[in-house]
Image: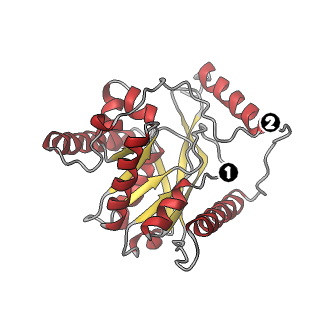
Amino acid sequence: MNNIEKSPDRIRILEKIEEYEKKGWFDRDVEDDPHGKELKITEVDYLNKKIFNRIATKFSNTVARIFMNNLIKKHELIIKDIIGLENYTKLDTGAIITCNHFNALDSFAMHIAYDYSGHKKRKLYKIIKEENYTSFPGFYGLLMRHCNTLPLSSNKETMKHFIHATDTILKRGDFVLIYPEQSMWWNYRKPKPLKVGAFKFATKSKVPILPCFITMNDSEIIGKDGFPIQEYTINISKPIYPDYEKSVKENADYLMKENAEIWKNIYEKSYGISLEYTKTETY
């Protein structure tokens, strides 16, 4: 098993990550995902008002859980530890949950943390890219469209509905998972610079940010791609609350900087090294 040749595709992705870090292209994806199309409001039911979509959601979540449990059983998804779970458990309002994005399946890790938090009466929603919602075929397309996802859109009218739905979900006490780095870099351990959108949502909906940062280490198991499967430690920090005497912009900037500092501290403490980037070029 340890003699599995390393996947040329994965090697290419790692080389691309190295290039992008040097150039400071932190918000650009490195995977060759399908190209998406514009998501129109008639194509999405954010609040699951239609009975067909409610049925599809229930079915998709059941299938997704079976799939996730199978990944765990086969040691393709390994949760080593959850640190700070009490910070999640003690939440008594809706919240924006932030997490670093480094694997197509890292949302399953965050769902496990949600399961252990004990908030069974609340739901966990995931904000996803427009192209993930409109372009993925088959099984993954099913998960993207019906597993409590909130797709972004390049259509202004659709985005109005997205913003309204996200606000409704947060104010009724549910959780919304956002990847504020905007990009996914495979097995990238460093926190990337954050985008402000998630923090504006929290401010406008008057809910806290729950910063989560997943650290990882190589397991002894070699995956099908020839690389060690990662063991995840989910680090959950204390929630950060907006200051309602400040403006939306002031709050969003404050929350974003606090979140970035928390992630930096977790990274440096977990790996025992300073956070430094190889950025050498300016564009």
**Residue farthest toward the front in the current orientation of the protein:** 157
Amino acid at pointer 1: Pro
Mark 2 burial class by Cα count in 10 Å: few <14, some 14-19, many 20+: few
User: Which secondary structure, mark 2?
Assistant: loop
Whether residue 121 appears in this view of the structure is: yes
Q: Nearer the viewer, residue 230 or 46?
A: 46
Q: Which residue corresponds to the image point at 48% horizontal and 23% vertical from the top-left?
A: 35
Colour mapping used in the image: secondary structure
Whether residue 118 appears in this view of the structure is: no
Which x, y percent locates residue 14? 67, 31
Q: Which circle marks residue 193 in the picture?
A: 1
Query: Is 177 drawn above or below residue 18 in the view shown?
Result: below
Residue 239 left/right relative to 123: right
Which x, y percent locates residue 235? 54, 62
Q: Quadrant of residue 282?
A: top right
Q: Which residue corresponds to the image point at 60% horizontal and 34% vertical from the top-left?
A: 29
User: Which secondary structure, mark 1?
Assistant: loop
The numbered mark, 2 or 1, whose residue comes first in the sequence reads: 1
- Marks 2,1: beta carbons within 8 A: no
Mark 1 burial class by Cα count in 10 Å: few <14, some 14-19, many 20+: some
Which x, y percent locates residue 248? 55, 67
Q: Which residue corresponds to the image point at 59% horizontal and 66% vertical from the top-left?
A: 255
- Of the residues tagged 2 and 1, which is closer to the observer? 2
Q: Quadrant of the C terminus?
A: top right
Q: Which residue corresponds to the image point at 20% horizontal and 39% vertical from the top-left?
A: 56
Residue 148 left/right relative to 279: left
What whole-number distance in Å separates the C-alpha atoms at marks 2 and 1?
16 Å
- Tag count: 2
Query: Is 17 drawn above or below residue 168 in the view shown?
Result: above
Which x, y percent locates residue 13? 64, 28
Which residue was labeled with disc 2?
A: 283
**Residue farthest toward the bottom in the current orientation of the protein:** 245
